[in-house]
Amino acid sequence: MLHSKNKIFYKDDDLSLLRTFKKVKYINGEKNNFKITYKHDLEMLKNYINKKIRMGIGFDVHRLVPNRKLYLGGLKIKSKLGTLGHSDGDPILHAITDAILGACGLGDIGQKFSDKNIKFKNIRSTILLKDVVKQSRSIGYFINNLDINVIAQYPKIKKFKSKMILNISKLCKISKDKINIKGKTTEKLGVIGKEKAIASEVIVSMIKYG
């Protein structure tokens, strides 16, 4: 419509034309907002993503003990047993955090948040994950998707999965459909099978922009 009312040919974009009619308001954009103007930009986007995608793997395991709270995926779960750890002992968020650090080449969770440091005593794992997500985004890495295994004989996580996914999506700043959680048991084998521990393993894919 603006073009039809204007007699001057603008070869740049609509923003150049818009300046002749009214003031332009600028808003902050996202680094991962890839601009698509022409058809060949779609092919460039495919090539760009293929070259910039990184993978990371994370694993964590915690003992189950009395008189401790149980946090899984950032949720407080009502349970007779809780996880033993320097922090709140959330194996899912710890595994996600380690996977992100691995994909970005930023070391591991023990280096970032040492259990020798008193300031991390009983700290919520949500705080640690938020910090790592912020760090990764500051160097241009954005989470594409998460595949999560929760390995536990107890408790059963089926009824908590939806809330976990919602919580993790907020912490990681990605949509819920980019997160998959699978509950696994060890068929009553080993310390996990004897309900003495919970483990989690995570694979993350991340895209680097810029």
Image: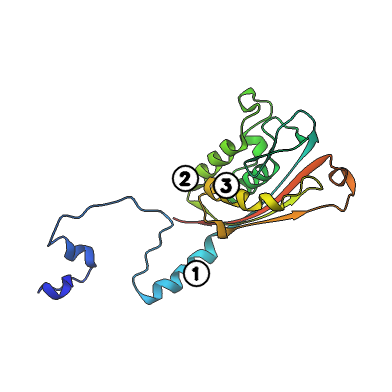
Q: Position of residue 137 (x, y in %)?
A: 49, 47
Label 2 Cα neighbours within 10 Å, binned few <14 / some 14-19 / many ≥20: few
Observer-side mark, 1 or 3, equals: 3
- Is residue 91 shown above or below 124? below
Residue 47: give its label.
1
Label 3 Cα neighbours within 10 Å, binned few <14 / some 14-19 / many ≥20: some
Q: Quadrant of the C terminus?
A: bottom left
Mark 1–mark 3 Cα distance, whole angstroms, equals: 32 Å
Residue located 76% across and 49% down the image = 156
Q: In the rendered view, does 196 fall on the left or right side of 111?
A: right
SS under mark 2: helix
Q: Badges 2 and 1: C-beta atoms under 8 Å apart?
A: no
Three-letter amino acid code at disc 2?
Ser
Residue located 53% across and 64% down the image = 51
Q: Which residue is mark 3?
A: 167
Residue 109: give its label.
none
Residue located 14% across and 76% down the image = 4
Q: Which residue is mark 2?
A: 138
Mark 2–mark 1 Cα distance, whole angstroms, equals: 23 Å
Q: In the rendered view, does 97 fall on the left or right side of 61?
A: left
Please tell me which of labels 2 and 3 falls first in the chain: 2
Label 1 Cα neighbours within 10 Å, binned few <14 / some 14-19 / many ≥20: few
**Residue with the most extreme top position:** 118
Three-letter amino acid code at disc 3?
Asn
Q: In the rendered view, does 13 fall on the left or right side of 178?
A: left
- Is residue 80 shown above or below 42? above
Q: Quadrant of the N terminus?
A: bottom left
SS under mark 3: helix
Of the pair 36 and 86, the residue shown nearer to us: 86
Residue located 68% across and 45% down the image = 92
Mark 2–mark 3 Cα distance, whole angstroms, equals: 22 Å
